[in-house]
Amino acid sequence: MTQPAAPTNHRPSRILRRIVLLSLLALACGAGAEVVSKTVYFLQPDGRSYLLERSLQTDASSHRFFVDKGISQDDLRHVEPKDFAWDDSSRDDLNILTFQAGGFTVIFPGTLAAPQLEEKAGGEFSYRSWDGRRNDDGRFGVWYSPDDFDRFSYTWIFPDNIELLSYTSNRDGDWIRRGNAVSFFASRVNNLTFELRYRVAPVDRPPKALKKSADCPPPETIEVPAACPEPPAVLAGEPGGCGLDCDGDGVINRLDACPDTRGGVVDRRGCPVSDAGDSDGDGVNDEQDLCPGSREGARVDRAGCSLDTDKDGVPDGVDRCLATPEDTAVDASGCRS
């Protein structure tokens, strides 16, 4: 292998459950190549565990990806390109993936941990992406050397039971929110850190359980849709502001599948709970439940049908291994059999 010349490093949060990524170090041949970085966190309903996709693309001829000894080759959910070398004997502290290509993508599971993840009252969490340490060159957070990231993106995707409250970065860029996901985009940046706040509700608790936010402005100061009664209920809903609840059922408008409910008990979609009740106990009443026989403990969508993120046949609500590779034989708990 040609001796590489240009190092990059990405240092995400510490990870528990023996999956700990200490550093990403890509060594590349070929100066002047555009450096494109993408990070995507798929946060799980507990607000702590996640599936991480990390990719780096350049015109360089080779890269090396360094991971902690706690990560085995079997822990990697996806690696691209498929031809790579795995070295777990050269160093005592790190394992090394070597790619003879201009970029790579790696996907693996992990868990956010203290001190970077702080749990507060009411199910609120605060996450800081940087652990406060700098390397010998003064680099910190998400960084690249010797130049900057030419194009950089950083995305978090949240499940339905998690409400995103705020997000900030130490560098200028564009934050874009789409549904229950938020992305940061920037050009020519380096040494990036991020902070996110979110509130986690138990999966079996409908959104109406969220409390009003003390930070919300009075309803009369908010621009109100013509169809919204006066005064509208105001619930914590959007970063830097509040969500309106026009029908007062405790489910903010953007999540309410039945926006004209007036009084009575509603399910997690904001629709009336019928006399027929909720026979499978999934939080969606029987009249709206398209899958009335959901398995006990299953995590369901708004139609009452079980979610199975990794498509292994075990519903998310009881799946202890939420990122099992496709076509892998699993046991009743969703883990490798």
Image (cartoon, rainbow, N blue to C red):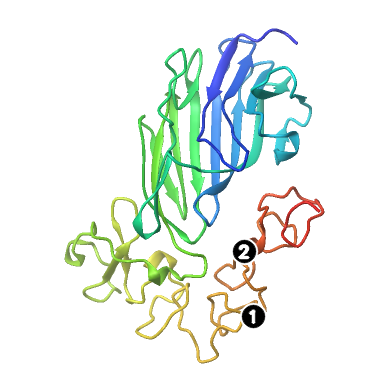
Compared with 62, 233 (above or below) is below
Question: Based on the displayed image, in which of its 4 quarters is residue 124 positioned?
Answer: bottom left
Number of labelled discs? Answer: 2
Q: Position of residue 291 (x, y in %)?
A: 65, 76
- State whether residue 34 appears in this view: no
Q: Secondary structure at mark 1?
A: loop
For the N terminus, which image quadrant?
A: top right
Compared with 336, 31 (above or below) is above
Compared with 22, 296 (above or below) is below
Front residue of 200/155: it is 200
- State whether residue 101 appears in this view: yes
Q: What mark, if any, has residue 292 been given in the picture?
A: 1
Residue flagged by tag 2: what amino acid is it?
A: Gly
Measure the alpha-carbon separation of dots 1 and 2. 16 Å
Q: Position of residue 45 (x, y in %)?
A: 53, 57
Compared with 300, 162 (above or below) is above
Q: Residue at x 69, y 15 (%)?
A: 61
Q: Residue furthest bottom?
A: 275
Mark before the other along the chain sequence, 1 or 2: 1
Neighbours of disc 1 within 10 Å: few (<14), some (14-19), many (20+): some
Q: Residue at x 50, y 88 (%)?
A: 274
Residue flagged by tag 1: what amino acid is it?
A: Pro
Front residue of 72/209: it is 72
Neighbours of disc 2 within 10 Å: few (<14), some (14-19), many (20+): many
Q: Secondary structure at mark 2?
A: helix
Q: Are marks 1 and 2 in contact (CB under 8 Å)?
A: no
- Where is mark 2, residue-wise? 317
